Amino acid sequence: MNKGQKTNDFNEIVFGRKSIKQYDPSITISRQEMTDMIAEATQAPSSVNMQPWRFVVIDSVEGKEALAPLARFNKDKVMSSSAVIAVFADMNNFDYAEEIFGKAVELGYMPEETKQYQLNAFKPLYDNMSKSAMRENIILDAGLVSMQLMLVARAHGYDTNPMGGYEKDQITHALGLDADRYVPIMLISIGKAASEGFQTYRLPVEKITTWK
């Protein structure tokens, strides 16, 4: 298990995950452990490995008090949680291509020729991609890392709740980010559940799957 993990039991992680409404406000998560969890979550896949996800962790009382009015019906989750992780997607994610591919060469993950080939192949595509296409691309990637983050949190012994009920038109500015660059994806509250989450029904596979 990775440092800080409480379990690597697949069933416990996946089937034990519930969306929690109320947390134990006495529980804190160290910034080192939060850093470790985000690092583990970012092993998620992304298009061309551009990793367009960006995170703002709100873990102070002042930060949560400032966020709560923007969270609509999720104020209790915000205030009782150990932290809220605001997940964004970066429209300018290809700005990091040189660093990502260059570090891969340095670490021996790819040869220099492959790095140059990929940069030459993908830079024109990204430069000419429409805003709507880029937005669709990075929202998908940020969704993948968000789910992985919730599962990582579960492995560390914490509970979460993905929240879409917040003022998306205000959150980027409120957190000091460039609204033209960063697309808000979701808020994820994290902490120790004060009570068990509700059991929920899932549609059977035969209703949601077509075989060809």
Image (cartoon, rainbow, N blue to C red):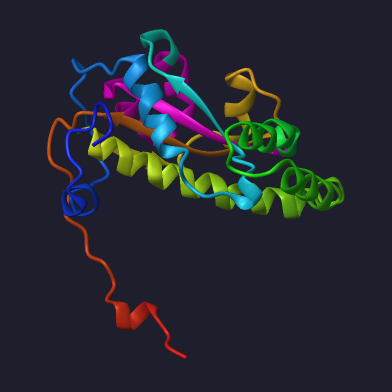
Residue 39 sits in which quadrant? Answer: top left
Q: Judge left or right: residue 127 versus residue 7.
A: right
**Residue 102 image point, x, y percent:** 69, 33
- Residue 72 painted magenta: yes
Q: Disc count in the image? A: 0
- The picture quadrant where one finds residue 133 is bottom right
Residue furthest top as drawn: 62
In this orientation, which residue lies closer to the viewer: 169 or 179? Answer: 179
User: x%, y% of residue 181?
Assistant: 72, 32
The N terminus - image quarter: top left
Asked whether the viewer can see residue 135, the reply is yes
Q: Which residues are magenta?
A: 64-93
Residue 104 is inside the magenta segment = no
Q: Percent from the top left, x then y, of residue 165?
A: 45, 40
Q: Residue at x 41, y 14 (%)?
A: 65
Relative to 208, is 116 on the left or the right? Answer: right
- In the image, residue 13 above or below residue 195: below
- Residue pictured at 32% horizontal, 39% vertical: 152
Q: Which residue is farthest left?
A: 195
Residue closest to the far bottom = 212
Instruction: Decide: is 130 above or below 78.
Output: below
Residue 21 visible, this angle: no
Instruction: Give the image location of residue 29, x and y in percent.
Output: 28, 18
Q: Nearer the viewer, residue 17 or 152?
A: 152
The residue at the point 73 percent across, 41 percent down is 112
Q: Is residue 85 left or right of residue 140?
A: left
Q: Nearer the viewer, residue 33 or 142?
A: 33
Q: Residue at x 57, y 28 (%)?
A: 171
